[in-house]
Amino acid sequence: SEDSNLGELDVLVVGAGFSGVYTLHRLRQLGCSVKLFEAGSSLGGIWHWNCYPGARVDSNVPVYEFSIEDLWKDWTWTEKFPSYTELRDYFNYVDSKLGLSKDIRFNTRVVAAHFDDQVDRWNVKTEDGTVVRPRFLILCTGFASKKYIPPFVGLETFQGVLHHTAAWPQEGVPLTGKRVAVIGTGASGVQVIQEIGPTVGHLTVFQRTPNFALPMMQTKLDKELQEKKKDLYPTIYKRRLQTIIGCDFNPYPRDLSSVSPEERRLLFEDLWCRGGWHFTGSNYQDILTNEEANMEAYEFWKEKARERIHDPVMQETLAPTIAPHHFCTKRPALEQTYYEVYNQPNVELIDLGKNPIAEITSDAIITGDGVRHEVDAIVLATGFDGITGGITQIDIRGVDGTSIKDKWANGVYTNLGMTTANFPNLFFVYGPQAPTALANGPTCIEIQGDWLAACIGHMLSNGLTRIETTRKAEEDWRNLVLDISTKGLLHKAKSWWMGANIPGKPIEQLNFLGGIPLYHSLCQSDAEKGYGTFVLSSIDKTSEV
Ligand code: NA7
């Protein structure tokens, strides 16, 4: 059925997290007809779905919020790194200020989108059978919306409580006093482990690769002090755009080897105390490019982590003598009490590197050594088909009927990390080959949302109906992304940033690592050159010829 109110929209936005909310807001300012479809029942995106115990953001406020003055001037946070509950409150507040919900259809999952070459419109289908035909389609589906569940033998026979962290029941799950297994020690696993460790009856952590978790140094925020600091916010938001990862700090502009060991130690200690991303983001500029500098940072990290772990076997499992990958080339978690949890008598750590999961039965996880780990509940903190999965899980077909999934089966091609050839009038925000997973979300999202609003504004005001990136442009962009990546160490790790966690997925850099300022200027200069790497046309003019 075609929804008559929605039929021929200018724009359909998919997803109501930070990207979708910002994009919807900016497009409404253009005065075009725009609606947003969201699969979940509320705003928040990642903060709607990932409501597992301990879920919180690893970017600090106020950089992790919209830079819109109308919003920040009346909002204060209670913590420097807010929990999902406070982030949900923030989204409701944003909605109350901007009145977005009236243009959003919740509980509406987009399953297919086929481009109609005859009319320059997308035919978009939802799970409930609604069909809409927007001119432009903007996917704001997030970099972590397709969860990954490994094919453990017997998983379906488990009779206890079983949840993936990204599909946690909204009403919560009672785990107090229970025997709980957590599989996976990525950012989600670390958060859930430190939160439930103290209250569950018994916790068994199944670790394949240690997380080089960094101290969050969480702090409570005082309302009065925040209000005073607001004079600085406009500067902070402009400054975000000048920093590599879109936060409020930059790498220390020296190579590690250029200073004495004493001086190195001082900077390390300083950054460690500051917490959050400082130990990577404000560290010597060659930490993520030079193997020796990277190794020295690892040695420091290892010493700090080991100081907190009592058991020598656990020390070696959690902070090994030899690092299995370069420091911070897999996404570190930010932790508060993660290592202390392992000193509790009710917590057990299984090293899957030595002893993998062989089978899951109705009431236990059985490891390779034959040991049955009996549990009442299993938490799957096993991650996502990241960055591309949210896009490729939708049946999207371009001009010649090829699906985006097939197009990207052997490697991702995009222009500016926002479009791909053969798929006119389709854009994605916070997706592949943009700064995405290596940048502060709102910073990247606002750059892209502003660019898209200007682009679509240009199309509409000039009566243009079709914008399509050239093959040459996407080949150039891909080469640039891969070229920048090979200059550093990140591409050497088997990480989800590289697509390496999903069997069969091509292993390649999925993020633009050139930093926010370069990304921003490349997007802007393309627009200033009249969208030089795109072909713009109008169906009306074509048919007149
Ligand atoms: P991650 O970071 O992908 O973590 C997934 C974890 O699950 C990781 O420790 C994996 O170990 C582990 N895993 C995956 N498959 C298996 C199997 N088959 N057996 C055992 N363990 C497995 O996902 P998160 O949800 O924690 O974080 C995702 C991002 O969301 C986060 O980085 C933030 O940017 C927000 P591995 O390391 O692959 O050995």
Image: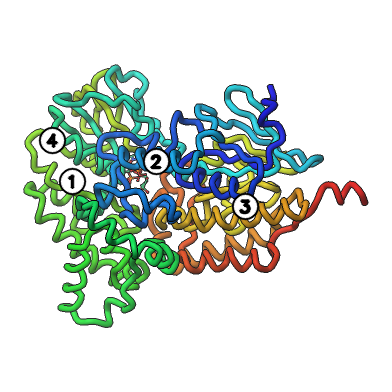
Q: Looking at the figure, which quarter contains the N terminus? A: top right
| Cα separation between marks 1 and 2 | 32 Å
Residue underneath mark 2: 93
Which of labels 1 and 2 is toward the front?
2
Residue underneath mark 1: 338
| Cα separation between marks 4 and 2 | 33 Å
| Cα separation between marks 3 and 1 | 40 Å
* Image spot of residue 381 (x, y percent): 32, 37
| Cα separation between marks 2 and 3 | 31 Å
- Residue drawn at 35 percent across, 27 percent down: 170
- Residue drawn at 45 percent across, 28 percent down: 41
Residue underneath mark 3: 419
- Of callouts 4 and 2, which one flags the residue occurring earlier in the amino acid sequence? 2
| Cα separation between marks 3 and 4 | 46 Å
Check disc 4 and report its element: helix, strand or loop. Answer: loop
- Of callouts 1 and 2, which one flags the residue occurring earlier in the amino acid sequence? 2
Check disc 2 and report its element: helix, strand or loop. Answer: helix
- Of callouts 3 and 4, which one flags the residue occurring earlier in the amino acid sequence? 4
Asked if labels 4 and 1 touch by Cβ distance under 8 angstroms, the answer is no
Dot 3 surroundings within 10 Å: few (below 14), some, or many (20 or more)? many
Above-or-below relation of 203 to 531: above
400 or 232: nearer the eye? Answer: 232
Quadrant of residue 455 within the rendered picture: bottom right
341 or 538: nearer the eye? Answer: 538
Kind of residue at disc 3: Thr
Kind of residue at disc 2: Tyr
Ligand 1 position by quadrant:
top left
Residue underneath mark 4: 198
